[in-house]
Image: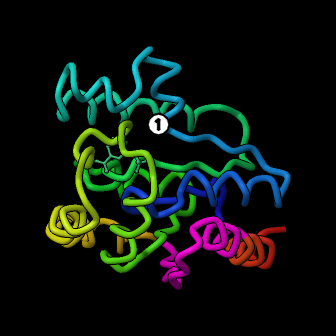
């Protein structure tokens, strides 16, 4: 398995939470690309989108990921932003840089998980009920699926209402998978 590892998937899929747990288990570095964006540009992705719009954000987001890939560290788990893989040739870039892993969830389960979180850092989802979240997620996820499913590995996440348990299970599963495929 080529490294680094890029976790991809919709908002709420556990890219950050499970990714951090996974990196701890492996003793690898962990980089959340939304946090890296904020460090580099001084605004969170949510604030940047509010101020400059989604196209400007996507352009900058692309270069954050590609610039970090130049660093001479290989044992890294990256949590990508949920929309990153679906812009221009970003998915091809990921596949050239390392191994991409898609954390695939059913839309109802994403809506449930997201409804249990603080949505203020997710401007497009803010203030939505679980039902409204699902109505929003369904068409967007359908449009994003062709990109996400280009991933090198697809992990179908079994749903468990206790979201922490899910993230731990995802991390453990990925840890075993990565250990078995890397030296
Ligand atoms: C986005 C997801 C966010 C962040 C930005 C846009 C999206 O990342 O990059 O708000 O379009 O799905 P997370 O998936 O980490 O929440």
**Residue 67 against residue 87 in the figure, above or below:** above
Q: Quadrant of the C terminus?
A: bottom right
As drawn, is 175 to the left or to the right of 16? right
Residue name at image x 61 percent, y 73 percent: 166
Circle 1 packing at 10 Å, graded few (<14), some (14-19), many (20+), is many
Above/below status of 77 relative to 35: below
Tell me the quarter of the picture where residue 109 sits: bottom left
Q: According to the image, label 1 marks what residue?
A: 34
Going by the image, does 99 lie left or right of 74? Answer: left
Q: Secondary structure at mark 1?
A: helix
Residue at 33% x, 50% y is 90
Q: Position of residue 67 (x, y in %)?
A: 50, 30
Task: Work out whether residue 60 or residue 114 is closer to the camera in this orientation and state it.
Answer: 114
Task: Count all numbered tags in the image, as a single digit.
Answer: 1
| Residue at x-position 33% and y-position 32% | 46
Res 49 → quadrant: top left
Classify mark 1 as within 8 Å of ligand 1 or not, answering yes or no. Answer: yes
Camera-side residue: 133 or 6?
A: 133
Specify start and end residues of the magenta stretch as a single range. 152-171
- Residue at figure coordinates x 14%, y 68% from the top left: 139
**Residue 27: percent from the left, percent from the top?**
85, 52
Name of the residue lying farthest toward the top: 42
**In the depicted structure, whether residue 127 falls above or below residue 66:** below
Give the image location of residue 97, x and y in percent: 53, 51
């Amino acid at each position: 398995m080529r490294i680094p590892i890029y976790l991809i998937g919709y908002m709420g899929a556990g890219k950050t939470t499970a990714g951090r747990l996974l990196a701890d288990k492996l003793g690898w570095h962990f980089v959340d690309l939304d946090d890296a964006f904020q460090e580099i540009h001084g605004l969170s992705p949510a604030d940047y989108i509010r101020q400059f719009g989604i196209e400007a954000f996507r352009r900058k987001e692309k270069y954050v990921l590609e610039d970090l890939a130049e660093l001479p560290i290989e044992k890294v788990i990256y949590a990508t932003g949920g929309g990153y893989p679906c812009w221009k040739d970003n998915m091809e870039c990921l596949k050239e840089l390392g191994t991409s892993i898609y954390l695939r969830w059913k839309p109802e389960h994403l809506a449930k998980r997201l409804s249990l979180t603080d949505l203020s850092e997710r401007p497009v989802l803010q203030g939505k009920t679980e039902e409204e979240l699902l109505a929003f997620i369904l068409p967007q996820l359908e449009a994003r699926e062709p990109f996400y499913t280009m991933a090198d590995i697809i992990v179908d996440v079994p749903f468990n209402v206790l979201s922490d348990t899910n993230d731990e299970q995802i991390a453990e599963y990925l840890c075993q998978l990565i250990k078995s495929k890397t030296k």
